[in-house]
Structures are given as structure tokens and as C-alpha cells.
Image (cartoon, rainbow, N blue to C red):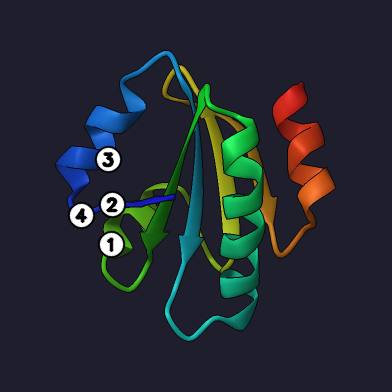
Amino acid sequence: MLEITSGEEWERQLDTDFTVVAEFTQPTCMPCRKLAAILQMVEPEHIDVKFFKIDVTVFPELAGLYGIQSTPTTIVFKGGKIKEKILGLHGKQFFKDLLAK
């Protein structure tokens, strides 16, 4: 899972034909840490999907842009558009099923 380092980088990552999964997180969020571990298990099984971690304390503008009000929140993008927005912690099978759609 890659970390976003700038808003410009994020815009470039969305400008792709790949499915993009973004976990919106913050350092003090324990469920976020668990979700990151789950997404890291799912990632190798989906080489056609790009996985990113976005720290809302570093990029509050991105959190505001996507209406992130709590963490963890995961957004799945397809062609730069929001396909799914998931609040909270979910298991590995949930994400495998979601990405199989």
C-alpha cells in the first residue's frame, strides 16, 4: 500500500484506468491500523488495483473533498470516479468480494 505525499500526486494516481482503493486514516486510529493490515493481505491478490493510504491529518483538503468525517473510511475509485464509499472496519472477504464486482 502506497502513501500519498502530495495532492498533485493523488490527482495523477486517479487519472488512470486502474481501480484505486484509498484508505483514509489517521495515526491514532486503531481500527485504521487493522484495516491497513487487511488491505495489505488483499493487495497481492489484485494486481490490477492500486492501494493507497491517505492520512487525513496531513491532507485535510482531501478528506474534505470526499466528505470524510470519520476514520477509517475506504473509497474505491474507477476511472477517477467514486464507485464505493465504505465506513469503518471490514474483513478481508468483504474487500475481496467488493473488488470482484
Left or right of 60? Residue 92 is: right
Q: CA distance from mark 3 to mark 2?
A: 6 Å
Q: Nearer the viewer, mark 1 or mark 2?
A: 2
Q: Amino acid at mark 2?
A: Ile
Q: Secondary structure at mark 1?
A: loop
Q: Earlier in the sequence, mark 3 or mark 2?
A: 2
Task: Give the tally of numbered discs.
Answer: 4
Residue toward you, 64 or 92: 92
Residue that badge 4 annotates: 5
Q: Amino acid at mark 3?
A: Trp
Q: Residue at x 37, y 48 (%)?
A: 65
Residue that badge 1 annotates: 59
Q: CA distance from mark 4 to mark 2?
A: 4 Å
Left or right of 59? Residue 54 is: right
Q: Earlier in the sequence, mark 3 or mark 1?
A: 3
Q: Earlier in the sequence, mark 4 or mark 3?
A: 4
Q: Amino acid at mark 1?
A: Phe
Q: CA distance from mark 4 to mark 3?
A: 8 Å
Picture quadrant of residue 16: top left
In the rendered image, the residue lying farthest to the front is 44
Picture quadrant of residue 90: bottom right
Q: CA distance from mark 1 to mark 4?
A: 9 Å
Instruction: Tell me, yes or no, whether the two marked residues, 4 and 2, touch with CB atoms within 8 Å.
Output: yes
Q: CA distance from mark 3 to mark 1?
A: 10 Å
